[in-house]
Image: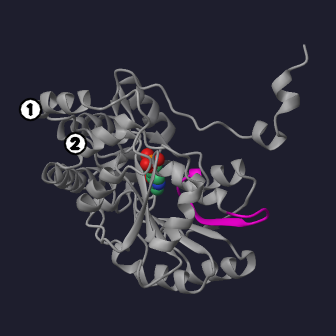
Amino acid sequence: MNNFINSWLRPDIQAINAYHVPASDGMIKLDAMESPFPLPDELIGQYLAYLADSELNRYPNPSAIELQKTLRKLMDIPDDLGVLLGNGSDELIQLLALACDTNDTILSVEPSFVMYGMIAKFTRLNYQGVDLNDDFEIDLNVMLRSIETHQPKLIFIAYPNNPTGNTFDRTVIEKIITSTQALVVLDEAYYAYANDSFLDDIKKYPNLVLLRTVSKIGFAGLRLGLLIGAQDTVAQLDKLRLPYNINTLTQVSANFLLREKDEINKNAQIILSERTQLSATLSAINVLKVYPSQANFILFKAPNANELFKVLKQKGVLIKNLSSAPKLTDCLRVTVGSGEQNQQFINIVEAFYG
Ligand SMILES: *Cc1c(COP(=O)(O)O)cnc(C)c1O
């Protein structure tokens, strides 16, 4: 039978491999940089009462005004910067791509977050990946040459980078920002676990915006991300946002949950100390190469990585297998979980190489 969708759909979309999310029911989930901390028991009653007040027969507040204020407080965003909310920061990456013109180019480093390249494909933009060096650092000369050659409209740099976990040299990033006409998007999804941020630099550089998300600080289920930039930049980009993109349940939940700034910061501190410990324990296994991390995950190179990944999975621990990705031969990425989860992971890895 003639397959309708194959004759109907753009061939380049047919050729895309769908973003794959593996089954994880009942597993210790250390594959997606989620937080291990659930809502504290003593907040559940209050939270439900707060939710019950929301009017689900009405459209949400169109610009989620209250939530903007909550996020500004949580992340110390100055009043004279603009904030644009997205249904996850993924939606904001897509919105930025929609702002581009036919034949424009999106440039990023590689390896990095795969959505930059995928969204360039969805929106029929050109995509240019610039290889990081063997230590996953940006080679400034290579980068500047690529910018010169390809004249990108958008440059995405994850800071810290996913999946490598490192931040880049601040002066290198500054040189990139000042040497291009592109809008430079620093994706600070992991800001809570990093030593540095460009939040205070937005006023200095008109072509700089930041992306952040609450996904990696405990609230992946809310689907809430934000773009922070100059007010006039945000006002223009806001035209591309679909009306009511942040649903009522997300607005209400986030308003309640994100006020717990102390709790959120305390949890981030726990993850940081768990990261230090996990990194040290992995490094003590001689055959592993453990990369430094400024995020809530650790990348490591492991002999026989595919087999280790399989054994972990059989024993109920799901991590991310990157071993067949370009420049990541034998690399695995583990999210920093609770102390107990990390210990279970470590036990299996130690037994595997023991
Ligand atoms: C996880 C991640 C995101 C996605 O964030 P959402 O807000 O959950 O869509 C964006 N950028 C990077 C670099 C990430 O690692």
Asked if residue 220 is positioned above or below residue 135 in the image, the reply reads above
The foreground one among 249 and 63 is 63
In the displayed structure, does residue 280 sit left or right of residue 57?
left
The image quadrant of residue 84 is bottom left
Q: Check residue 102 for magenta coloring.
A: yes
Residue, x 18% and y 28% (percent of image)? 49
Range shown magenta: 100-115
Foreground of the two, 312 or 178: 178
Rounded to the nearest angstrom, the CA distance separating label 1 from label 2 is: 13 Å
Determine if residue 296 is in view. no
Mark drawn on residue 42 = 1
Residue drawn at (79%, 64%) of the image: 103
In terms of secondary structure, where does tag 1 sit? helix
The residue at the far right in this view is 2
Label 1 sits on what residue type?
Glu
Q: Is mark 2 within 8 Å of ligand 1?
A: no
Furthest toward the front, the residue is 58
